[in-house]
Image (cartoon, rainbow, N blue to C red):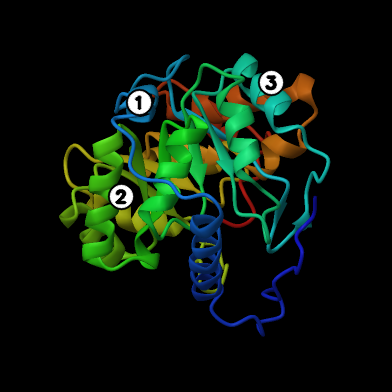
Amino acid sequence: MTPEHPYPTLDGRGGDFLAHMIAAARARVAQARAKRPLSRAARAAYPGRLRTALEHPRAGGLAVIAEIKRASPSKGAIAPALDAAARARAYERAGADAVSVLTEPTRFAGSLADLEAVAGSVTLPVLRKDFIVDPYQIWEAAAAGAAAVLLIAAALDGDELAALLGECAAIGLDALVEVHDEDDLLRAELAGARLVGVNNRDLRTLAVDLATTERLAPLASAGTLLVAESGITTAADAERAARAGARALLVGEALVRAPQPELATLIAALRSAGRTDSSAGSAHVSAESEAAQ
């Protein structure tokens, strides 16, 4: 499966990518609700699975969230024939601490079927990554077996973010709240987020700058666990994120493209950047992160 209508962003004529994706997500929710009514289930899972995995990585150093992604807005098709469940099992064997699954269908070629297949194939916590704008999408994630969902602060006002965080807590899911600037971080923490992903990619323009993590990490409250997202292309970049205060990385394209026998080496190189005695800063193992969040 490839994106139906690759979004024109690279030439600067694409407009506000995030606004486009929010509108599309709301339309999909309305269609899904009409076809498959859902309501909040009794607590579907026990909370804290993703945070615990990131606080206590399997092999020390930085925790690694390995992503399942077939396509992206900036790169187009990455791995259109990817078997989500098989790749997730390979990630688990290679030492990943959690798995992220893109479920957005039109630009990332993902699906809820991928999420369900992955959640049923690994023992690691699984994150639903999408443009979440409605409690219905959280209920879908729980029904599919996810341990957590991504909430994008820039896509939600303060009340909406707080309500969705509350919905996650009510059914036992963690929420990774994604931020890109100081206002996002402030609103996220005021809403109660303590698991925060700093997206080095601006979702309005798709421009990437690793300095975003360096700028925002020192502003985070004590007790907030930071995940660096996007722009981690080498172990030296991972070390830079670790020095800024990140305790985990979310990596997509590099892991999707890597030959299966190389996954363990690649994950170890990224992870080692978080060890104080690491020499990862001088390593030159390519680890390009997800092309678009």
Q: Residue at x 28, y 68 (%)?
A: 157
* Amino acid identity at mark 1: Ala
Q: Are marks 1 and 2 in contact (CB under 8 Å)?
A: no
The residue closer to the viewer here, 118 or 237, is 118
Q: Earlier in the sequence, mark 3 or mark 2?
A: 3
SS for callout 2: helix
Q: Earlier in the sequence, mark 1 or mark 2?
A: 1
Whether residue 271 sits left or right of residue 197 in the image: it is right
Tell me, yes or no, if residue 24 can be seen here. Answer: yes
x and y percentages locating residue 16 in the rendered image: 53, 78
Whether residue 169 sits left or right of residue 242 in the image: it is left
**The quarter of the displayed image where residue 253 is located:** top right
Whether residue 67 sits left or right of residue 26 in the image: it is right
Q: Residue at x 25, y 38 (%)?
A: 169
x and y percentages locating residue 191 in the rendered image: 19, 54
Check disc 3: other Cα within 10 Å, few if <14, some if 14-19, many if 20+. Answer: some
Q: Quadrant of the C terminus?
A: bottom right
Q: Are marks 3 and 2 in contact (CB under 8 Å)?
A: no
In the rendered view, tell whether residue 198 sits above or below residue 106.
Answer: above
Per the image, the residue denoted by label 2 is: 217
Q: CA distance from mark 1 to mark 3?
A: 24 Å
Whether residue 156 sits left or right of residue 31 in the image: it is left
The residue closer to the viewer here, 62 or 173, is 173
Q: Are marks 1 and 3 in contact (CB under 8 Å)?
A: no
Q: CA distance from mark 3 to mark 2?
A: 31 Å
Per the image, the residue denoted by label 3 is: 90
* Amino acid identity at mark 3: Ala
> Which label lies toward us, 1 or 3?
1
* Amino acid identity at mark 2: Ala
SS for callout 1: loop
Per the image, the residue denoted by label 1 is: 45
